Image (spheres, rainbow, N blue to C red):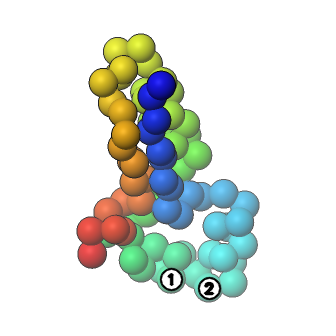
Amino acid sequence: VTAVAIAPGWVRTEMAEDFIARHGEAAAVADIPIGAMATPDEVAELTAFVLRPSQRSLNGATLDVNGGSYIR
């Protein structure tokens, strides 16, 4: 059994767009060190990578996809 968690922060989705419409882009990315939200494609690409047979040793990990937000 392999267990890997993918923990995204802000992802540019409809819900994020609603927040941006109310509060502005700057407020949405203020706590993201790279200054941008992840895209759904970026999260999907990471998921596909984790599922590759060549990544069988990647186990018991949580992969934070948040542009560095958790390191502040």
Place of residue 36 in the rendered image (x, y in percent of width and height, measured from the top left): 43, 63
Classify mark 1: residues with Cα within 10 Å, few (<14), some (14-19) or many (20+). Answer: few
**What residue is shown at x 39% (from left), y 77% (from top)?**
31
**What residue is shown at x 49% (from left), y 62% (from top)?**
9
Place of residue 29 in the rendered image (x, y in percent of width and height, measured from the top left): 45, 73
The reply to whether residue 34 is visible in this rendering is no
Mark identifier at residue 51 = none
Left or right: 43 as drawn, with respect to 59: right
The residue indicated by pointer 2 is 23
Left or right: 5 as drawn, with respect to 11: left
In front here: 51 or 35? 51
Circle 2 — which element? helix
In front here: 60 or 31? 60
Circle 1 — which element? helix
Place of residue 15 in the rendered image (x, y in percent of width and height, measured from the top left): 71, 66
The reply to whether residue 25 is visible in this rendering is yes
**What residue is shown at x 53% (from left), y 63% (from top)?**
10
The residue indicated by pointer 1 is 27
Q: How many marks?
A: 2
Q: CA distance from mark 2 to mark 1?
A: 6 Å
Residue 18: quadrant of the picture: bottom right
Q: Which amino acid lies under the numbered mark 1 shown in the image of this protein?
A: Ala
Q: Which amino acid lies under the numbered mark 2 shown in the image of this protein?
A: His
Left or right: 21 as drawn, with respect to 48: right
Place of residue 54 in the rendered image (x, y in percent of width and height, measured from the top left): 35, 15
Cβ–Cβ under 8 Å for marks 2 and 1: yes
Classify mark 2: residues with Cα within 10 Å, few (<14), some (14-19) or many (20+). Answer: few
Q: Is residue 6 above or below residue 35?
A: above
List the single residue furthest toward the left: 71
